[in-house]
Structures are given as C-alpha cells and as structure tokens.
Amino acid sequence: MNLYVGNLHYCLGEEELFELFSQFGMVKSLRLVKDNKTRKSRGYAFVEMDNEFAGEIAIRRLNNKIIEGRNVIVLKAKTKAVQKPKHYEIRLRQSTYEKMMG
C-alpha cells in the first residue's frame, strides 16, 4: 500500500521515517520529497508498505499524531493520473484543423 505522509518537520530524514513506519510492517520503499535546488525536505514523503494491513495500521496509528511538534498527516496515496504528452494534443488539433480546411 502506498501512503502519503504530509506536514513533516524539515529536520526528519529518511532514516527516521523508515524507523517510524517499520514499526507497523515491512517498508518496501520510501521517498522523502526534496527541493531540487537546496536538497532540503519539502515536508512530505511517500511510503510503500509491504501489504494493505500494514498500511492501514500505520494510517490509524500515525495520522494526526504530533511528531517533532507537527501534526503529521498519513493517508492512502492517490494514484497518479496518466497524462497524454502535450505534443499529442498539438498534433491532434493540427490534424482536426487540416480536416476542416479540406
């Protein structure tokens, strides 16, 4: 199960998050989102738990819990929508225009 973890204190690192979520089951992957320029935490992460049960337990135990002075949010992550590339839309508009013009 993929989890979204938000409102994290910027001092929390991947190791601390791994330890925190490992209490509830095996952590398959963890990605702490960082700013591209500064490489500092942006205050949220994505954690993939080994199974649904472990994810549900982590949500129940950690959502709205105060960690490092912050009220942490833990939710089931939404799946990323697949987007068509922009060039596809441009080609589609061009071909529609060409058909209309004859």
Image (cartoon, grey):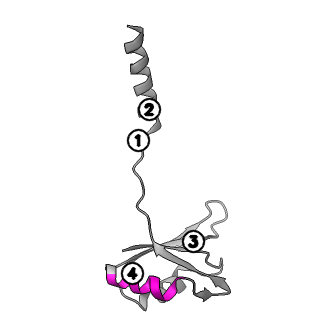
From the image, give the main secondary structure of the stretch colored magenta: helix
Residue at 62% x, 87% y: name it.
Answer: 66
How far, Cα to Cα, is label 1 from label 4? Answer: 31 Å
Disc marking residue 44: 3
Circle nearer the viewer, 3 or 4: 4
**Range drawn in magenta:** 53-63
Residue at 40% x, 87% y: name it.
Answer: 57
As drawn, 71 above or below 44: below
> Sequence-wise, which precedes: disc 1 or disc 4?
4
Point out residue 64 in the picture as x, y percentages from the top left corner. 57, 83
Name the residue that disc number 2 marks: 89
Kindly identify the amino acid type of the residue bearing the numbered disc 1: Lys
Q: Is residue 89 magenta?
A: no
**Is the residue marked by circle 3 packed among few (<14), some (14-19), or many (20+) residues within 10 Å?**
many
Name the residue that disc number 4 marks: 55
How far, Cα to Cα, is label 3 from label 2? Answer: 32 Å
Q: Are marks 2 and 1 in contact (CB under 8 Å)?
A: yes
> Sequence-wise, which precedes: disc 3 or disc 1?
3
Picture quadrant of residue 93? top left
